[in-house]
Amino acid sequence: MVFKRRNPRSLSGWAREMVYPRGGFRRATQYVMHRMRRLPDEPERVARGFAAGVFISFTPFFGFHFLGAVVIAWALRGNILAALLGTFVGNPVTTPIIAISSVGLGQWMMGIPGMMELPQIGRAFGQAGTQVWENVSAIFTPRVMHWDHLREFFHDIYLPYLIGGILPGIAVSVLFYWLTVPLVRAYQRMRSNKAVERAERREALRRPPRE
C-alpha cells in the first residue's frame, strides 16, 4: 500500500504535521517525490495525476482540494494517488504566496482597484467562514441569517482568487507535468534494470558449477 504507515499517526500528530511536517518541508517534499516515483503506473498517467493535484492547489476550494484533484485526474485519465500527492504543493509555505498572487491577478483582470495584503485576505476568509457557520446554525435557532460579509467576500476575494489562480495553476501544473514524466520514467527504468540484474544473479546461482 502506498500510504500505509507502520505506526499510524494520532489525530493531533496529523494536525501538527499539516502545519509543519516533522523534518521540515524539504524532507516532506522529498518524501512526496519518492512516493510519486514509486507509483506503479505509466509515467504520463502519473504526471497527469500529479499535475491535477498541483492545479487544484491554486484554487480557493479549501477543504475540497483532494476531491477536486481526484475529479480532474479522472477526467484527464491520470493516476489518482499521484493527484492526491500533487495537492501537497499547496502547503502552509506556498499557500500564502499562491493566495496573494492569485487574488492580485484576479482583481487586476476584473478591474477591481486596490491591492489586498495577505492579512486582509486571511481575515476575509475567517469572517466568511464564521458567517457561513452562523447562518447554518440559524436554521435551528431563532437568529436571523446575514449575508453581507459573504457577498463582499465572494466579489472582492473569492471570485478574484478563483479567476486569478487559473493561469498560474495551468502554467505550474504543465511545468510539473514535463518534469514528472522523465523523472518517473528514469526511476522505473532503473528499477526494471535492477530487477533484471537480480534475476540474472539468481539464475547464475542456480546453474550447476562447471567441471
Image: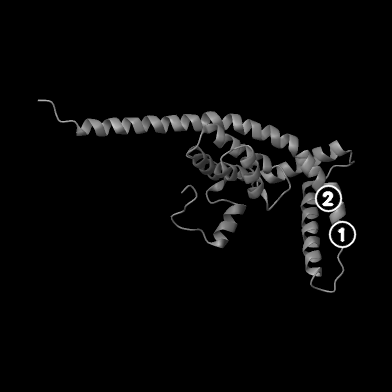
The quadrant of the image that shows the C terminus is top left
Packing grade of label 1 (10 A; few <14, some 14-19, many >=20) is few
User: Relative to 102, does residue 186 appear above or below in the rendering?
Assistant: above
Question: In terms of depth relative to the viewer, which is nearer, 154 or 113?
Answer: 154
Residue 173: x %, y % from top left: 65, 35
The residue where tag 2 is placed is: 154
Q: Residue at label 1?
A: 147
Locate residue 90 relative to residue 195 in the image: left or right.
Answer: right
Q: Residue at x 72, y 44 (%)?
A: 59
Mark pair 2, 1: CA separation? 11 Å
- Residue, x 78% and y 65% (percent of image)? 136
Above or below residue 148? Residue 104 is above
Q: Identity of the amino acid at label 2? A: Phe
- Are there few (<14), some (14-19), or many (20+) residues within 10 Å of tag 2? some
Instruction: Give the amino acid at mark 1.
Output: Trp
Q: Position of residue 201 (x, y in %)?
A: 27, 32
In x, y percent, where is residue 109?
Answer: 84, 36
Which residue does the image show at 68% across and 53% down from the upper left?
A: 63
SS class, disc 2: helix
In the drawing, does residue 201 fall left or right of residue 143? left
User: Which numbered tag is attached to residue 7?
Assistant: none
**Mark closest to the chain's N terminus, 2 or 1:** 1
